[in-house]
Image (spheres, rainbow, N blue to C red):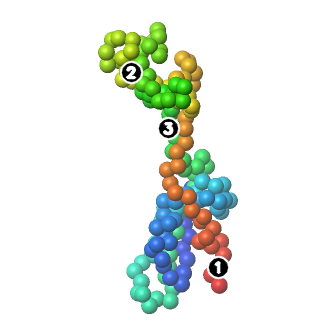
Amino acid sequence: MTLEVRRNEPDYDPAQALRFVVAVNSLPFFGASKEQVRCVHFAPTQEYKATATHVKILYRFEFRKDGWKGRFIQRGRWMKQDGKRVIITNADRPGTLIKVAQKNSNAQVTTPQLLTKDGQLLPDGAPPEFGDVEKYPLANFNELRLTQAWS
């Protein structure tokens, strides 16, 4: 879903626009929960003179029910063991066919292995685990005062 707001404003501040464009809402906004709305446009609708008394601004927001965080699958060629990062070797997966650089049991695996969120090898047959990553900066869209008229 997309929301467009066009409004005459006393001025246009490009620095303010840069804070909001591609940002995600840090607080509830137009009925959507935190991190469900992304600002994709914040700019004048046409050229204007520096002496203009008002500037027509177009704001465009995209709404996404499941939010704007990126998801990634937990996997790698390294794991955590006793709090340290160690290489996963063929010996860590006995009885499983893992492509390795060399055939000895201490050879590093060349195919990333599924891991838990704690960095441990995921047990065979367990469903993959996922992590979230913040792809966009957060901003308080309520600062734009789009739900009220300028006074």
Q: Are marks 1 and 3 in contact (CB under 8 Å)?
A: no
Q: Earlier in the sequence, mark 1 or mark 2?
A: 2
Is any part of residue 39 visible from this angle? Answer: yes
Residue 149: which numbered mark, if any? 1
The circle drawn on residue 90 is none
What element does badge 3 sit on?
strand
Q: Can residue 120 be seen at all in this image of the molecule?
A: no
Q: Amino acid at mark 3?
A: Phe
- In which quadrant will I find the C terminus? bottom right
Q: Position of residue 77 (x, y in %)?
A: 42, 27
Total residue callouts: 3
Is tag 3's residue or tag 2's residue first in the polypeptide sequence?
3
Residue 27: x and y in percent read: 65, 60
Q: Secondary structure at mark 1?
A: loop
**Residue positioned 50% across, 34% down in the render:** 73
User: As displayed, is residue 46 above or below residue 90?
Assistant: below
- Residue 72, image x and y in percent? 50, 38
Which tag is nearer the camera, tag 3 or tag 2?
2
Q: For marks 1 and 2, give the CA distance.
A: 61 Å
What's the residue type where badge 1 is placed?
Answer: Ala
Residue located beneath label 3 in the image: 72
Task: Tell which of 115 and 17 is nearer to you.
Answer: 115
> Which disc is residue 109 wearing?
2
Q: Are marks 3 and 2 in contact (CB under 8 Å)?
A: no
Q: Along the line of sight, which residue is nearer the eye, 46 or 86?
A: 86
